[in-house]
Image: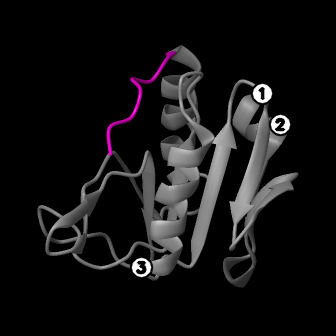
Amino acid sequence: MERSLPDYLHSKTQGLLAGFRARWGGFLYHCPELRLKIRPRLILIPDVSVFYPDEPKERFSDGPPFSTIEILSVDDRLKDVREKVEICRNCGVPLVWLVDPHSKRMYTCDGNLMEVPALQIPELGLTLTTTEVFG
């Protein structure tokens, strides 16, 4: 599936999200643009993949990450993004998030998109608010 090229806000948000590893104690591994081998002929490239408790050891991750984060660009079609996040959920990614830097909104993707004020990992006691992500 071909996607539009990222714009400045997309790129800035991706960098900020990947930089939260130090804030979260360094035990989450954030990997921007890592290829995930979902099935033999299906490879996804989420904007940010988060691994826990171990970092990926291979060139391509062949198991699902702990979380994926998709960041919307102005030219993205919601239908295509929804399809990508549904594939992630169906392939065993426990936490799938969607971040829209243009409207400064964040969503969890658990069958439906639901707007949330913060991205949370309850079992680890971690929260990332819209203020932290978008400034």
Q: Dot 2 corresponds to which residue?
A: 131
In which image quadrant can residue 131 be found?
A: top right
Q: What mark, if any, has residue 135 been given in the picture?
A: 1
Q: Residue at x 59, y 35 (%)?
A: 72
Looking at the picture, how far across and down is residue 65, in whole percent?
41, 72
Q: Residue at x 72, y 62 (%)?
A: 108
Looking at the picture, how far across and down is residue 35, in whole percent?
24, 56
Q: Which kind of residue does numbered mark 1 sit on?
A: Gly
Give the answer, above or below, for where 28 lies relative to 71: below
Give SS at disc 3: loop
| Residue 107 located left or right of residue 84 | right
Is there CB contact under 8 Å for labels 3 and 1?
no
* Label 2 neighbour load within 10 Å: few <14, some 14-19, many 20+: few
The reply to whether the magenta stretch includes residue 2 is yes
Q: Which kind of residue does numbered mark 2 sit on?
A: Thr
Is there CB contact under 8 Å for labels 2 and 1?
yes
* Alpha carbon distance from label 3 to label 2: 30 Å
Residue extent of the magenta highlight: 1-7
The first of marks 3 and 2 along the sequence is 3
Give the answer, above or below, for where 76 lies relative to 35: above
Looking at the picture, how far across and down is residue 116, in whole percent?
85, 56
Q: Which kind of residue does numbered mark 3 sit on?
A: Cys
Q: Residue at x 54, y 53 (%)?
A: 69
In which image quadrant can residue 17 be found?
A: top right
Give SS at disc 1: loop
Q: Dot 3 corresponds to which residue?
A: 91
